[in-house]
Image (cartoon, helix red, strand yellow):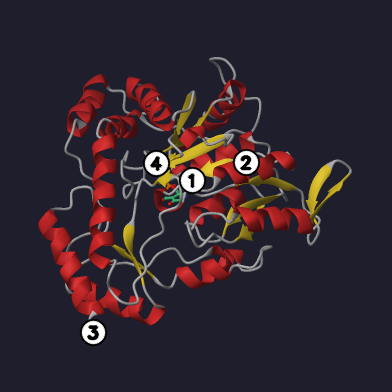
Amino acid sequence: MIPLAVPQLSGNEAKYLQECVDSTFVSTVGPFVGRFEQMVATAAGSKHCVAASAGTTGLHAALIALGVDRDDLVIIPSFTFIATANAVSHAGATPWLMDVARESWTLDANQLTNELERNTKVKRGTLVHRGTGKRVAAIIPVHTFGTPADMDAIVAVAKRYSLPVLADAAAALGATSHSRKIGELGADLTMFSFNGNKTVTAGGGGAVTGDDEDLMKKLRHLTTTARVGANYDHDVVGFNYRMTNLQAAVGCAQMEQLDAFVAKKRMIRDTYDSAFAELPGVELFPRAAGTESACWFSGFVVDAGTATRVRSALQEQSIDARPTWKPMHLQLPYMDVPRASLDVSDDIWQRIVTLPCSTGITNAELNTVIEAVRAQLRQ
Ligand SMILES: Cc1ncc(COP(=O)(O)O)c(C=O)c1O
């Protein structure tokens, strides 16, 4: 099988893990966690970083740090991985689903502006959603597949309504927008995932970056059981969300290879794009203006019937072609939450074919995939 996205553990992973074992620092205390936080902060262009046990737990704690509370609404794109919505639910809040723009597959800033204008009002100093009466508490734009969302527009509208912005940059480390790094795009907090299928992995894990020292201190406090002092005093309901030294050891070894891995991901995207550009009925993954995507996933877009047919034909040839995220409004837990019109989300998810894009993929494997796709699309 040519896999979809598997880790490449070709650096110092084993060496650093052995150091953890030798030193007995295998849990949440140990030198790799701090080193990992430094490396992620630098790569993100942020002043501070707090490592977490997963991207999802990082998102959850970040929402609490930003003041999201029970019964609030948090705006997210419907076209995302379910972890974005679940983190909102874990905070006791409800997602308000919006569409993505066709030219980037990221949160549609025009719709966001219109929805806030038409469907909210200020009641006793609080921004509330007209339909539900719930407080609107935050916006989570997602840097879909590593492509930066239109943050200038999103942050501008967020400021107008005094809404905090938490960027879900799960797979976007290494991307830029107008030459700015992902942590430099105006979000209050930015979350990265180091899950096993990400460009750089920690086995599992997450990190949240930001520039506001007090907010980051609060976040660190929340992720480490909100302990005060050396004894068993805790001042709020905290979480056991700290990354372990074992995860961070793998994460540090992977971060040392970030630039090379992102370059390889972009090469894979370019290779597929030039191979499929001329095929009739095929659209390419979007390239959002002014951005350099981290190109986490690559593939192509066709009509829904062809997508299903090609995916199963490739699977039969041991090529791990997959569908992509089913949008949140089609998921059982989120069918009844507030939503805007979701035409683009409804359209694209059924038409996307994702193709093998591991950083370790060989040219021969890429050619095998390309020839298999071409053979299918000529039918
Ligand atoms: C868009 C998005 N958000 C959140 C997550 C959650 O990250 P994790 O799996 O590390 O919890 C992921 C990846 O898995 C993701 O793709």
Secondary structure of residue under mark 4: loop
Disc 4 to disc 2, C-alpha distance: 18 Å
Disc 4 to disc 1, C-alpha distance: 20 Å
Of all residues shown, which one is farthest toward the right? 124
User: In the image, is 209 to the left or to the right of 317?
Assistant: right
Mark number for residue 175? 4
Exactly how many numbered labels are in the figure?
4
Q: Which residue is mark 3?
A: 379
Disc 2 to disc 1, C-alpha distance: 22 Å
User: In the image, is 79 to the left or to the right of 136?
Assistant: left
Placement of 30 over or under 56, stated as above or below:
above
State whether label 2 is within 8 Å of ligand 1: no
Kind of residue indicated by mark 1: Thr
Placement of 307 over or under 43, stated as above or below:
below
Of all residues shown, which one is farthest toward the bottom? 379
Mark number for residue 64? none
Q: Which residue is mark 2?
A: 155
Of mark 4 and mark 1, the one earlier in the sequence is 1
State whether label 1 is within 8 Å of ligand 1: yes
Instruction: Name the quarter where the C terminus is drawn.
Output: bottom left
Of mark 2 and mark 3, the one earlier in the sequence is 2
Q: Residues within 10 Å of mark 2 (few under 14, many from 20)?
A: many
Q: Are marks 2 and 1 in contact (CB under 8 Å)?
A: no
Of mark 2 and mark 1, the one earlier in the sequence is 1
Q: Which residue is mark 1?
A: 56
Secondary structure of residue under mark 3: loop
Instruction: Name the quarter where the N terminus is drawn.
Output: bottom left
Q: Residue at x 30, y 32 (%)?
A: 255
Kind of residue indicated by mark 3: Gln
